[in-house]
Amino acid sequence: METLSLSPPTLDMAQWKDYTCREQMIYKRILPTVSVALMVRKGRTELADVPACDSLNPGHLQLVSKLKNPSGSCSVDVSAMWWEIAGVKEPCIITACEYAVSLWKPLDTGQWEKMYSWHFAEVPVLQIVPMPDVCNLVCVALGNLEIREIRALLCSSDGGCEKQVLLRTGNIHAVLGLTKRRLVSSSRTLCDQQVEIMTFAEGGSEEKQFLMPPEETVLTFAEVQGTQEALLGTTIMNNIVIWNLKTGQLLKKMHIGDSYQASVCHKAYSEMGLLFVVLSHPCAKEREPSGSPVFQLIAINPKTARSVGVMLYCLPQGQAGRFLEGDVKDHFAAAVLTSGTIAIWDLLLGHCTALLPPISDQNWSFVKWSGTDSHLLAGQKDGNIFVYLIS
C-alpha cells in the first residue's frame, strides 16, 4: 500500500501535539484506499515521495466521438446533461461559443446532431453552469472579464422554441448549480456582498434565499458531498467558509494557509466529521522539488478550524505548465495546463495517470467531466469537441 504523509506547510511538532487523539486517528484514515503516515523530520511534517507513474499512456483515454461546432466565434466551454427530446431523455452535449450556446443529441452512428441554439447579441458567454439533477434546463454566465449576467436556457413545452430567462445581473464573482434544482451565486456592490440561492420550481418559477455573507469576496463554491444542506466557498483571502443551506447561517471561516495564493475549490467531501477539499493552484510555481503542483487534497476539522495538507497532485518529471482550468468528478481530476496539454490524475492513487497533448497543433482550451456518464469532454477554441472514455 502506498504511504503518504500529511504536509501542512506550517504544522510543526508542537502544533501536531495539540490535535486530539481522535483528530490524529482520523487524519491517518484520510482516503478509503490510501494509508496516510505522519513523518516528522526536523520538527516539521514533510511530504513523502509519491511513486512515479509507470505508464503515462494516452491509451488510457479512448476517443469515442467528436463534434465540430460550425459557429465562427471562439469556443469557450462544454458540458453534458440530460435533455428530453420527443419524450425520450437523451445524454446531450452543450457547447458554448462567444455568442451562441448549442445543444447536441447523439445519433446511432456515433455522430451528433444540433437540436437547439440560443443566441446572445450584446454580452458574450463566459461559461456554462450545469444544473446537476435537472432535465431540460441549463444556465450560462455572460460577461467580458467578469460575470455580468446569469441566464437560464430552456425550450417551450412543445420543444419548438428556445427561451432565455434573465436570472441575475451585477458584479458577479462566482456561480454554481446545486442539487435540488438550486443555483448559488455571489455578487458585490460598493457597500456589501450578497450570496443568493435560487430554487427552480417544476412549474418554472423561482424562489430566492439569501445566505449570510462573509466579509471577504467569495470566489468559488462547492457542495459538500456526504452532508446534506452544506455549502462551502473559498474567498479572496485564502479562507474557506461553510454555510447551512437550510438556515442560511454562515457556520465557520477557516484559513487554509498562504503557501498557494488564489486557490480554487473544486470538490468537497464529508467523512467522519472532517471536510476533505480538492483545490487547484493556478498561481503555483512551475518548478518545485516534488514537481509542478496542480491539485491538492486538504483535510479540515470544522469544529477547530484546523487544516492539514494530505496530498499534492503534481505533474510528472519532464512536464511543464500551470493550472489553467479543470474539473473534478468522483476520484478523477482533469486540468488544462498553460502548456496546452490536458493532464488527468487518479486522486486515490495520487499520481498523474494520463496526458493528452495538443491535437493538430491546437492547444486544449477547456475540459469537463460528463454529467451523464464517465466520459471526458475536451475542447479547442476552433470549435472541435472530443469525447473520451477513461479506460
Image (spheres, helix red, strand yellow):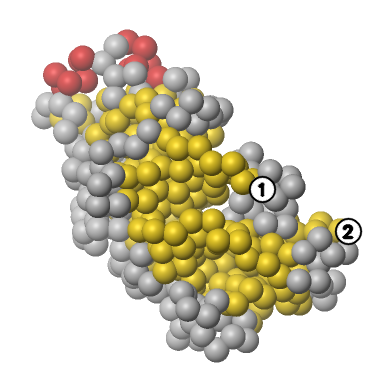
Mark 1 or 2, nearer chain start: 2
Q: CB of mark 1 within 8 Å of CB of mark 2?
A: no
Q: Residues within 10 Å of mark 1 (few under 14, many from 20)?
A: few
Residue 321 occupies quadrant: bottom left
Q: Position of residue 33 (x, y in %)?
A: 51, 32
- What amino acid is at disc 2? Gly
377 versus 213 height, above or below:
below
Q: Residues within 10 Å of mark 2 (few under 14, many from 20)?
A: few
- What amino acid is at disc 1? Ser
Residue nearest the observer in this picture, 359 or 283: 283
Q: In which quarter of the image is the C terminus?
A: bottom right
Residue at 50%, 37% in the rendered image: 209
Residue 324 occupies quadrant: bottom left
Task: Find disc 2 in the rendering and name its residue.
Answer: 87
Q: Is residue 131 in sight in this rendering? A: yes
Mark on residue 20?
Answer: none
Q: Nearer the viewer, mark 1 or mark 2?
A: 1
Q: Is residue 51 in sight in this rendering? A: no
Mark on residue 205?
Answer: 1
